């Protein structure tokens, strides 16, 4: 048995999102004029041994240390 | 007023995920031995004019044409 968590990583408010901006421009060029904004983000689906200790704390730790850049990104964790 | 949709893009089953594999290896090297697997994905938060026609169909179209690569990726759409 294993436990699953998904970590969502988003750019902090005010940080430039060149990928989102580029996609928004491309959508306009393709004739899709109804999009107001596009924001990009990434996520990681983590499968964890069910008998691990302090899973929530461990997932928070690795999200801060490895999965996100705390200077420019926020993360949220969801249980699957 | 505007409508929001989030498009989640995942690699199809069986497609190599080098980013996920690398993160999994890094976690082991950092001493986190309780992770069974790591899968990476991306998402896009779309803000759409509320008076746009056929929003669901439009979001499916742009997800296929621009946001994902249908050869190697699947997408799902969630209403925010």
Image: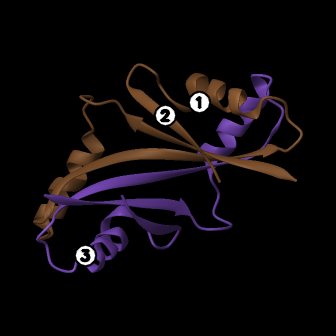
Chain colours: A brown, B purple
Residue A47 falls left or right of residue B49: right
Disc 2: CA contacts within 10 A as few (<14), some (14-19) or many (>=20): many
Q: CA distance from mark 3 to mark 2?
A: 29 Å
Looking at the image, do the residues carrying marks 3 and 1 touch, with CB atoms under 8 Å apart? no
Task: Name the residue tied to disc 2.
Answer: A75
The residue lying at 78 percent from left, 30 percent from top is: B28
Image point (85%, 44%), residue name: A50
Which residue corresponds to mark 3? B58
Helix, strand or loop under label 3: helix
Tell me the subunit letter for badge 3. B
Classify residue B47 as left or right of residue A33: right
Q: Which percent across, then down, holds residue B44?
A: 36, 54
Residue drawn at (23%, 74%), measured in percent from left and top?
A: B55
Say which chain tag 1 marks: A
Identify the residue position indicated by label 1 in the image: A63
Write down the quadrant of residue B63 in the picture: bottom left
Q: Where on the picture, by quarter, is residue A7?
A: top right
Q: How far apart are the alpha carbons under marks 1 and 2?
A: 7 Å
What is the x, y in percent for residue A49? 84, 43
Q: Which residue is rendered at x = 62% and y = 53% of the image? A: B17
Badge 1 element: helix
Residue B61 coordinates in the image, percent (x, y)? 30, 76
């Amino acid at each position: 048995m294993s436990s699953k968590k998904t970590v969502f990583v988003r750019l902090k408010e005010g940080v430039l999102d060149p990928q989102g901006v580029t996609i928004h421009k491309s959508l306009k060029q393709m004739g899709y004029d109804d999009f107001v904004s596009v924001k990009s983000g990434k996520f990681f689906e983590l499968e964890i041994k069910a008998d691990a200790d302090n899973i929530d704390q461990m997932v928070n730790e690795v999200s801060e240390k490895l999965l996100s850049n705390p200077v420019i990104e926020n993360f949220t964790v969801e249980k699957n």
